[in-house]
Amino acid sequence: MSTTLALLTALLAVAKDSVPVIVNSFKGEVSSLVFSLHEDTDDRLTILATNFGPLSETVKGGLVHIRSRFLSVSLKDNASVIVKPTESVVFDLFPSSDLSSDGTSDQDCSISLKTGSARGTEFWKEIEVRCVDIELFHFALIQ
């Protein structure tokens, strides 16, 4: 009886630490980074990023689509922003090139951000915005 109890106790101790690892391997540890436009000025766009996932992610830059044109934008000093799990970060995007023509845009206006996960994968996430939401930024660029 005491051997069975000892084995059961050891099994429970091991299971307590291994069950979360097994569950995460099936559901995948994918971060959930959500963006929203915080402020529009004539020289920058301020973005709020919130990470609802279990892994840190980085924001590396992006594109602003304005009707059928696009503009590359970057973070200050071309640095990346790290957004840790369950945290929010506010950062600014600055123009890094002139407006270019792009006849393939499906939407009038949007902001696409290049992100990277802690696992090394890179992908684009899009913020749908109304053109009026970024009109100060847009107006300054076309002058």
Image: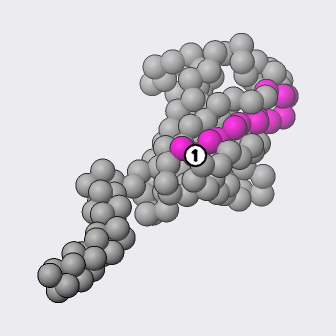
Amino acid type for the residue under numbered disc 1: Asn
Q: Quadrant of residue 3?
A: bottom left
Q: Where in the figure is residue 56, as x and y percent of width and height?
A: 55, 57
- Secondary structure of residue under mark 1: strand
- Residue 48 drawn in magenta: yes
Farthest residue, direction bottom: 3
Q: Which residue is drawn at the image coordinates 61% and 56% (left, top)?
A: 84
Farthest residue, direction front: 1
Q: Magenta span: helix, strand or loop, mainly?
A: strand
Q: Which residue is drawn at the image coordinates 33% and 54% (left, top)?
A: 28
* On screen, residue 17 above or below 45: below
Q: Which residue is mark 1?
A: 51
Q: Which residue is drawn at the image coordinates 28% and 71% (left, top)?
A: 12
Q: Which quadrant would the N terminus be assigned to in this image?
A: bottom left
Q: Residues within 10 Å of mark 1 (few under 14, many from 20)?
A: many
The reply, left or right, for residue 36 in relation to residue 39 is left
The reply, left or right, for residue 32 in relation to residue 69 is left
Q: Which residue is drawn at the image coordinates 72% and 18% (left, top)?
A: 133
Q: Which quadrant would the C terminus be assigned to in this image?
A: top right
Query: Between 19 and 72, which is closer to the camera in this rendering?
Result: 19
Q: Is residue 56 visible?
A: yes
The reply, left or right, for residue 47 in relation to residue 63 is right
Which region shows up in magenta? 40-52
Q: Where in the figure is residue 69, as x and y percent of width and height?
A: 60, 25
The reply, left or right, for residue 29 in relation to residue 143 is left
Query: Between 81 and 8, which is closer to the camera in this rendering?
Result: 8
Q: Is residue 58 visible?
A: no
